[in-house]
Image (cartoon, helix red, strand yellow):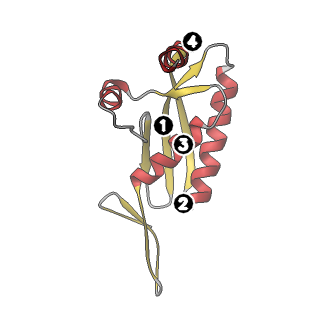
Amino acid sequence: MENTDSQLIVNKDTSGTIKISEEVVKIIAGLAATEIEGVAGMSGGIAGGIAEKLGRKNMTKGVKAEVGEKEAIIDLSIIVEYGANIQDIAHQIQNKVKTTVESMTGLIVTGVNINVQGVSFGLDAKEDEAKTK
């Protein structure tokens, strides 16, 4: 596997070449993390918040990935729901992201680091619901 212009060459044989963009690895990891119950969202910092306010959804918000020839390390910044057990959620995310990225890309995920950046009290969901009524 080679890294060429942010694309990982995962298979090169007589049939042709298969390339996976590093962005794809980040999208897979972010989507897998948000499937876990208790995750209110991803924390992308100021730049991510500005992009969302402009109407562009950033699928890699809160996700960093270091991808080598055969391995990947993924860092996720999350916001948890109030009342959720943070350690349980973090372990579930680590397992889900690891298995999903490995099964979809063939990379070996050597680490999934979780950074809890905030707690959601559910006010945003209630405000959005009130606006639609």
What is the secondary structure assignment of the residue under circle 1?
Answer: strand
Q: Which residue is drawn at 42% across and 47% down?
A: 66
Whole-number angstrom distance, CA of label 4 to CA of label 3: 21 Å
Find out whether the residues at labels 3 and 1 contact each other: C-beta distance under 8 Å: no
Q: Residue at x 67, y 30 (%)?
A: 37
Please tell me in which quadrant of the rendered image residue 81 appears. top right
129 lies left or right of 53: right
The numbered disc on residue 105 is 2
Whole-number angstrom distance, CA of label 4 to CA of label 1: 24 Å
Closer to the eye: label 2 or 3: 3
Q: Name the residue under label 1.
A: 75
Quick check: 93 above or below 25? above
Q: Answer few, some or many: residues within 10 Å of disc 2's Cα (few below 14, many 20 plus, some between 14 and 19).
A: some
22 lies left or right of 80: left
Q: Name the residue under label 3.
A: 31
Q: Which of marks 3 and 1 is nearer the N terminus?
A: 3
Position of residue 32 measured from the top left corner of the image (x, y, whole percent) = 58, 43
Q: Which of marks 4 and 3 is nearer the N terminus?
A: 3
Label count reads 4
Closer to the eye: label 4 or 1: 4
